Every structure is written in structure tokens, then in C-alpha cells.
Amino acid sequence: MDQYVVRAAEQLPALLKAFRKQAGLTQGEAALRLGVTQQTISALERNAQKVSAERLLHLLGILGVEMVLQGKSTLQRGESRAVGDMPPW
């Protein structure tokens, strides 16, 4: 599965649109599953900077995409860390 490094919110709209198309969903179908209007999906695909984390995770789930968070310098390529292994900030 391809991985995409997202370093800025400006990258999200194009990725969301590409993932939606890859899932074979129209904006209307994705909106129906998310419980929003087609216009909301269209807005997210143009400017996703203000989407809530909850809504983003729900949409990614609908699109069959998972979010993986990785520290820049602490993990080697291919390694993963469980939430319980996180440092106690």
C-alpha cells in the first residue's frame, strides 16, 4: 500500500479527492456515508484545513484509508509503535 507524507494541511484536499475516487465513490456517496452534504465534501476537497480530527478520521475510514503517525527521527523505516509505548509527556 502506498504511503503519503503529509506535512501541511494544504496537501489534504488533493489526497482526499484521490482516495475518494480510488474508493469508487462520488462526492454525494461519500457525503451520504459521512452524514453531510455533497457541498461539504466538495469544500473539504478544496480546503480541508479546518476539518475536525473526528470528521477527518471518519472520512478516512469511509474511504478505506488509515492514518499512521510516525516520529521523524525515532522510528526506522517499516517499524511501528503502539499507543501504549508512547512516552509519558
Image: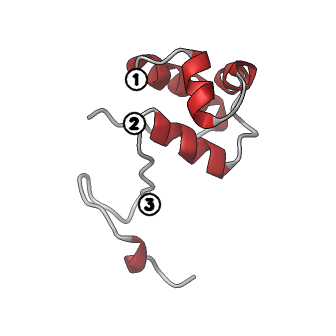
Label 2 SS = loop
Q: Residue 78, how many percent across, how many down?
A: 23, 53
Q: Residue at x 40, y 79 (%)?
A: 84
Viewer-proximal residue among 29 and 44: 29
Which label's residue is closer to the chain start, 3 or 2?
A: 2
Helix, strand or loop at mark 3: loop
Q: Amino acid at mark 1?
A: Ala
Q: Quadrant of the C terminus?
A: bottom right
Proximity of marks 1 and 2: CB atoms separated by less than 8 Å: yes
The residue carrying pointer 3 sits among few (fewer than 14), some (14 to 19) or many (20 or more) residues within 10 Å by Cα, namely few
Q: Quadrant of the N terminus?
A: top left
The image shows residue 11, relative to residue 69, as above or below, that is above
Q: Which residue is mark 2?
A: 64
Q: Position of residue 82 (x, y in %)?
A: 35, 70
* Quadrant in the picture for residue 35: top right
Q: For the residue carrying disc 2, how many other residues have a C-alpha within 10 Å: few (<14), some (14-19), or many (20+)?
A: few
> Residue 22 appears at what percent x and percent y?
39, 19
Q: What residue did someone put label 3 on?
A: 71
- Residue 23: mark in rendering: 1
How many labels were placed on the picture? 3
* Badge nearest the viewer, 1 or 3: 1
For residue 86, above or below residue 11: below
Amino acid type, callout 3? Gly
At mark 1, the secondary structure is loop
